[in-house]
Image (cartoon, rainbow, N blue to C red):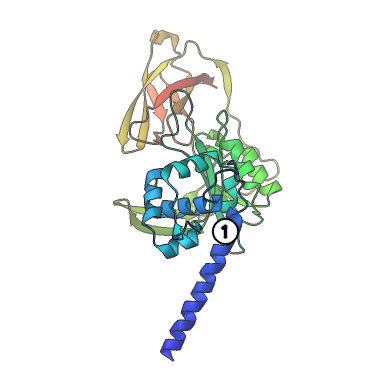
Amino acid sequence: MNRQSGMCVLVMESMSLASERTLLLRRLAEVRDPRDPRGRCFSLVSLLLVTLCATAAGFGSYRAMAQWAAAAGPVELVRLGPRPCGPFQLVRTPSADTLRRALTLVRPADLEVLLRVRGLDLETVAVAVDGKVLRGSGSNASVAVTVIGAMAQDGALVAQQRVADKSDEIPALALLLSVLDLQGVVVTADALHTQVETAKVLVEEMGAHFVLVVKRNQPVLWEACRSIPWSEVTARHKRSEVGHGRLETRVVQAVTRPPPTAGQTERPRQRSCRATPHPCMQFSNRVAGCNVTVEPDLTLMVDSSSVDPDVTYEITYEIKGDESGPVIDTAELSDQTSLNYTPSLIQTVSSGTKVTIKIADVTKMG
């Protein structure tokens, strides 16, 4: 009985693998072959299968892919597609030059059908969107290639496309997600996509929900979030885990901001004339890995008598170097020497990223 049960499981697994392989072959066959019909020794499906399998095994270069194919057994070669030829019915494997010529002719947009092998199913509840710059794709004559992708909560890549050279990830997000059915799905993205238009597209056009990161590049929204009494919020979830050599504690709190009551309005910030000349601000950064704490250190480049000690000045400055985009923050100067501010914590791509600060505006506060 045990032997028969084991054989049954083996057959069911083989049928499942055969079904998935058939679906993959059908999708690969949809990719247009741009090569000249004359002199083809291998089908494009076979070359794509060799590339996929070799890449999954950790072979990244064309030469390594060809070596992987040459070392494969006869059973694996038959499944990959190369047909026996010659009087001895030997199975030839593609060379590195053959793989390079074929893959460089295939359009990346045609390979997008591979992402539709596994689309969003009924169990998909969240999709994460992020963009990355391809390492080694830039040069002195061309900009680096940026791709934006969408990943389901189980780690499956469900959509991906290249960002236009003269554009950024913000308009590319809507185009990327337009091929997916996101009705009722939660879309997450970093602070770069915390935009009003992005939120409208997700909710009104796609019927999705969103979880977007709020940083100081949205100063009004940032201050609104800071004004919420988080210590009084009871809907919260806390989880601690060890990763990357450190203990991380994540706290998730959910709160609904009530609409303003009748007659209640937000107090506008009072501003008057622009202060001239601008004070110059120098910054000292405390760097810890890729986290940079920016603290303003004020130095007046003009005579202090030109700064009214009875007036409070609001200094708005822009910090560049954060991976999510420019960060806008403010500091208040009073009594000519008292500078009130909150340290800005930004996250750079690497510890060598240059952080620059530029004053955007100086105003008198009434």
Judge whether 89 appears above or below 345 on screen.
below
Total labels drawn: 1
Estimate the x, y position of residue 16 in percent, counting from the top left: 53, 71
- For image coordinates 51% across by 43% down, the residue present is 103
* Left-right relation of 268 to 311: right
Q: Is residue 125 visible?
A: no
Q: Is residue 47 visible?
A: yes
Judge whether 157 appears above or below 133 on screen.
below
- For image coordinates 56% across by 56% down, the residue present is 126
The one nearer the camera, 19 or 77, is 77
Residue extending furthest toward the left: 245
Residue extending furthest toward the front: 87
- The C terminus sits in image quarter: top right
Secondary structure beneath disc 1? helix
Estimate the x, y position of residue 78 in percent, counting from the top left: 48, 62
Estimate the x, y position of residue 6 in percent, counting from the top left: 44, 83
The one nearer the camera, 317 or 187, is 187
Q: Quadrant of residue 138?
A: top left
The one nearer the camera, 333 or 197, is 197
Estimate the x, y position of residue 88 in percent, counting from the top left: 44, 60
Judge whether 271 appears above or below 240 on screen.
above
- For image coordinates 55% across by 30% down, the residue present is 165
- The N terminus sits in image quarter: bottom left
- Give the residue type that dot 1 points to: Leu
Judge whether 73 appears above or below 224 on screen.
below
The one nearer the camera, 285 or 309, is 285
Other-residue count near label 1 (Cα within 10 Å), few / some / many at <14 / 14–19 / ≥20: some
In this figure, which residue is indicated by the disc labeled 1?
25
